[in-house]
Image (tube, helix red, strand yellow):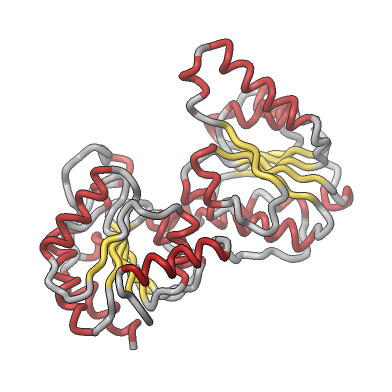
Amino acid sequence: MSHTPVSALSPQRILIIKLRHHGDMLLITPVIASLHDNYPDAKIDVLLYKETEPMLVNHPLISHCFFIDRRWKKQGVRRHIGHEWRLLRTLRAQHYDLVINLADQWRSALLTRFTGARQRLGFDFPKRKGMLWKKCHTRLVSVADHEQLHTVEQNLSLLKPLHLSHINTRAMMSYQPDDHEFIQQLLAEHQVAGRYIVIHPTSRWFFKCWSEEKMASLINQLATEGYPMILTSGPDHAETEMVSRIQAMSKGEHIVSLAGKMTLPQLAALIDHAALFIGVDSVPMHMAAALDTPYVALFGPSKLTLWHPWEGKGTVLWAGDFGPLPHPDDIKTDTDERYLDLIPVQAVLTPAQDLLK
């Protein structure tokens, strides 16, 4: 296996691979920034899942986003293979000098290998100890300390073999002026002017959510601060229904639901201009931290070390500080249990009021 210092190669074409969820994509942006800072003339592309493309499509340092559509496998074997083959040929035609494989799937390793890049970095995952994984990469980086690192730090650790002179730890969530204009029009339609609070009470996994009753109680008490409150959620019916229940229980004068009505870049524009963000462990929470919007983030049985808001200004409330929680690995994601209900309303209200001062 080659041990040529990658930094000596001055790569001109770089591919970053990450095949995970929306929040994971936001948390690779420090890797993108670090590579750009050290190789300012390099073209940087990203390979991701199609549904996560909105998280990076507006990033100013990315030349192109290539994607894998997980719906390909539903189109039959022949068409699926055709899509995969065309992707492989397209990536190989880019003539990458350097591939940063942040993913742990076999598919990512094989694509890394067949790009033909001279330098291919990957993680030395315990579950990927075979010779094939090694042959797909020219250098593997240990993950021995990953349980003690935030996800951003884990991602950045893959850059160690590059011996970069500067590491940029800043996460970035980007959107277009059109996204901001859309939000301004939407707020005007609901007579929202000036500073406002964004509340995102939902997650695709409801065990990460506070109860509707507690969220409504918080809203009712925050209403005395005089800020319009904007309720948001993803487009899933279960999430928008949850927001509807919260809104029905809330008594403030200016409570607006925009649940399911925005793209992710539009949601970013909304959060960017908010006085405060309140939400659970979800993509919008990471957006708020990246956008420097003050936040109060509620966490339950998630791996807090890995997933807490990265940098930014705010307060993280962990339900485990208020009572016993199961280990995150023991959670059944389809449970109806609301573990965040251990967190009292006052514990959220106080830091929210402090951040609004």
Residue farthest toward the bottom in the current orientation of the protein: 357
The residue under the point 67% across, 55% down is: 32
The N terminus, quarter of image: top right
Q: Position of residue 11 (x, y in %)?
A: 84, 48
**Dividing the picture into quarters, in which one does residue 316 lie?**
bottom left
| Residue 100 relative to residue 189: left or right | right
Residue farthest toward the top in the current orientation of the protein: 78
**Dividing the picture into quarters, in which one does residue 218 lie?**
bottom left
The foreground one among 103 and 124 is: 103
**Number of numbered discs:** 0
Q: Position of residue 297 (x, y in %)?
A: 33, 65
The residue under the point 43% across, 60% down is: 267
The C terminus, quarter of image: bottom left
The foreground one among 82 and 261 is: 261
Query: Image height check: is 154 above or below 220?
Result: above
**Dividing the picture into quarters, in which one does residue 214 lie?**
bottom left
Q: Position of residue 246 (x, y in %)?
A: 17, 60
| Residue 276 relative to residue 13: left or right | left
The residue under the point 15% across, 66% down is: 216
Query: Image height check: is 233 above or below 237?
Result: below
Q: Position of residue 296 (x, y in %)?
A: 33, 70
Query: Image height check: is 42 above or below 140?
Result: below
The foreground one among 2 and 23 is: 23
| Residue 43 relative to residue 297: left or right | right
